[in-house]
Amino acid sequence: MPADSELPRTDAAGLPPLALSRPHEALGKARDLLATGPPPLEASFARQAVGIVLREFGDIEAAVRELETARRLARRSGWAEREADVRATLGVALAFAGRTTAARNTLNAAVRQSTGHLRGRILLRRGGVLATLGHHRDALADLNSAVTALRAAGDPIWEARARTERATCDLALGGLSRAATDLSRAEELFNANGQELESADAIVHRGVLALRIGDLPAALHCFDQAAERFGKLGLPDPTLSVQRCAALLAAGLPRDALDEAHTALDQLERSHGQATKKAELELAAAGCALAAGQSDAALRHATRAADLFDHQRRRWWRAHARLVKLRAQVAATPPITDPRRSAEQPHSTSTERHHAADAEPRRGAGTNPQRVADTELQRAAGADPHRTADDRPAGADTHRATEHHPASADTHRATDHHPAVTDPRRGGEGDGVELLREAARCARELAALSSPDVPLAHLIAGRLALALGRTAVARTHLAAAARGRRHGPALSRAVAWLAEALRAEAEHDPARLMRACRRGLDVLDQHRATLGSSELRAQASAHGAELAALGQRHALRLDRPRLLLAWSERWRATALAVPSVRPPDDERLQADLAAIRAVTDRLAQARAQGLPTAHLAAEQLRLERAARSRALHAPGQDADATTGCDVPALLAELGGDRLLELVDVDGRLHVLVCGSGTVRRFPAGDTEEAARHIDLARFGLSRLAHGRSTLSPADLLAQVEKSGRALQEALLGDAAHHLGDGEVVIVPPGRLHAVPWALLPALRERTVSVAPSAGTWLRARRAGSPSTGRVVLVRGPGLRSDGAEIRHIAPEYPGRVVLGDGTATVAGILRAMDGARLAHVAAHGTFRADSPLFSALRVDDGPLTVYDLERLRRAPRQVVLSSCDSGLTAPTGADELLGLASSLIQLGTTGIVASVVLVNDNAAVPLMVELHRRLSRGACLPAALCEARRAAATDPVATATGWSFVALGAC
């Protein structure tokens, strides 16, 4: 039989390599050739190219049929190595179809049938399939031989494919350095040889590596860049979706990740795509649903994934699907309080008694234990990124070596809802024991597979053992989970420190418990410093929620208010403590934002005229997604940030004033009253009940402002006042009677920030300011109020009052800059506001709970969004926003805030007046005039607002309008 080197020269041999570099062109040429009735040899190349394109387009069954025909034609041609090459391509397609036994048999036959250079190519394909099935060490043996053979043969494209595939195996086994070397060389070779599709794949791999080493912005940028490349080629890429899910989960964006997984699954179903990819996407969707708190959906996805992997005989993947399934089962079990951690909480008012003892844990952690979620275990980048080796026909069937393992797509939450530890006994002792056994089995199986998810399995087993009262078993599992706390990616180390904290708590070692919590949060501080996006910084705090809650709960058990304050501050509004990163001058981002303004204006006009708006709404959504995606790419500056609060310094700054920090521990509110050198704790109401009272109060104020009721304004006002009394009891309890005689600062949890505080009877006549954290207030207070500088007054379009307040305010400020009537554009406003002493914006405001950074003020050329404000080099020192809902923020992460007001605070604004209710434009005018009259005479913002309320309260609507505004920041 002739040797491969003696194959007759034919143009058809170029079709298989063309199938992955320019698939549409290859498909057309192959079909044109087949239409001429070519001889078997040429026809085998054409059929092979068609099969490769169909496989990459997702039509696997059609691809298998084409490749089986190609194999028969190759055999008829009489060239054994031609048949071996087509067999290898067919073997990979069979693996994609989930027919794994047939795939391995076909590939083994191809290896036996080949020699020399071709053998290296076929070993690459077999190695890729072995890696897909989870046999990484066996795969590495094939891939090492393939790299050596292909390099020796001077075959750069196939060498690049082999290096890419080997890198995915090394990533799966923890060999980051070798993976980085291989990926860098592979990308060079692909680019040098014009391989468009595989160049896009190389970008995906670069993103996987970035995610694995913890560079989240770089990973997101790579995945978006790859998506753009694949889009231009017209190719769906399920593996890219799996990796984007992993990155979005690492970013703390589970709903975005779940949307990505569902979209990819729908697309795969429509195209009848690869069964292997469907299984991987089901697993990714399971992890996303679990992180989004949808345990039932997670269980369904995980069960489907496990069944598919079992059918496909993919042991590695099946083990990970079983782990996610276990986590979903645990999450779906009703939680109860673990008796070891639910020591009776003190309910009596307490005053700190041990000031010196309280000083040490100042770096502790606090968060909103309402959703003390599971701490995320991220193997940043995919613990196991791996994509089946493509087949390489003798001409060059390019390989897409990116079948990334589920670990990369499944960013884990350690378990659900601590402190209410899931109690497996709820389903009966036997069920709990079986869950524990399953967790132990998962840990053993994953360890045998060298999976990076072994610590997660041990952590789950440790939690289950604790809930069952099996302390010794729990210690063993938690110790195993804690081993990685000093090495590896930041998010993995944080999970290990959580395991160490739980182990210390089980062993009644409070000093070690607090040390572990502090160390874990310090690690997460380092991770957050790598992020430039304000959204990512806020979302990243979710990873430390349980560590922070452990510290809070311990301080509460000790009944030490100062310690509880320190731990509450440690993880509250931490994103605002990080120096703001000004977004890069990204022309495409700015173009997207300009396009958003244009389409928003067209959308408003279409609605006003009763015209169809669906296409404009869809375009607005597309542009917003693109802009948001680009903003997430911003890298951090690794700047040291002061998190937490210096309690002695806070008390010294307060003097006789009072700061009230509301702390949510296990769904109950506690008020820490700080001032006159002490910190006292008062129990208050239930957090959920308080949230309901807030909604009722805001609804009542809105009805009063806009006349949406058959009741008289006086009767409505009486109802609103009644709701204020109930709200005070829920939020403050007895603390309302211990406010002293000075100014009052309120520091609520993130989800309780939309409170019209002046509605509370105890605060109605007081100078009150609101801050995201005590530390934020202290920094703003020390910055002081500006006495000189530019004053900017902005009037937006469409106000019922026509911005009348601007005309009355302007005389108070000689030399002011006034923008309106076409000059109040985004660019003009940003230029004027940059470095200003005071900015007043009278404009319609929109709060976007679905996407807080698109919350906006309506100005002459469209919406002025948070993304626009982040371009300021120097934020105005003080800002007055006389617009609806301008003070609203979206609680996110552990206890973070996103919105117009919070973005200005992070940028350096020290004082803001804004509304938390839809206000009446006309009624706001006299309030704003009175406010500025006092500001121009030297009053600070909170005091000016308090006095302006009294002066402007001439009727029920005016009174409600005054109550709707709050002062944020410091006096």
Image (cartoon, helix red, strand yellow):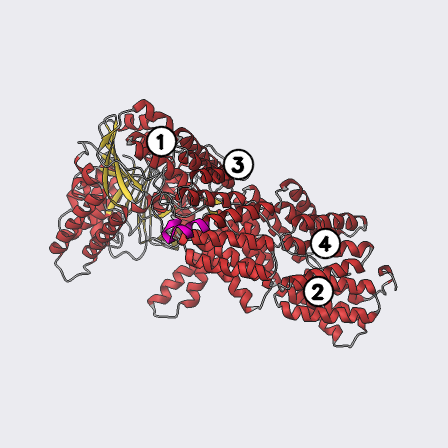
SS at mark 4?
Answer: helix
> Mark 1 or 3, which is nearer the eye?
3
> Mark 4 or 3, which is nearer the eye?
3
Labels 1 and 3: the sequence-earlier one = 3
Residue 540 versus residue 106: which sits nearer the camera? 106
Labels 4 and 3: the sequence-earlier one = 4
Labels 2 and 1: the sequence-earlier one = 2
Distance, label 2 to label 1, CA atoms, is 63 Å
Q: Viewed as shown, does residue 357 lie left or right of 388?
A: left
To which residue does mark 3 refer?
483
Looking at the picture, does residue 702 appear above or below residue 967?
below
> Mark 4 or 1, which is nearer the eye?
4
SS at mark 1?
Answer: loop
Q: Which mark is residue 645?
A: 1
Looking at the picture, does residue 926 appear above or below residue 703?
above
Q: What secondary structure characterizes most of the magenta part?
A: helix
Magenta span:
424-435
Distance, label 4 to label 2, CA atoms, is 14 Å
Distance, label 4 to label 3, CA atoms, is 35 Å
**Quadrant location of the N terminus in the rendered image:** bottom right
Q: Amino acid at mark 1?
A: Cys
Question: Which residue is at the far front?
Answer: 430
SS at mark 2?
Answer: helix
Labels 4 and 1: the sequence-earlier one = 4
Whether residue 760 can be seen here: yes
Q: Which mark is residue 124?
A: 4
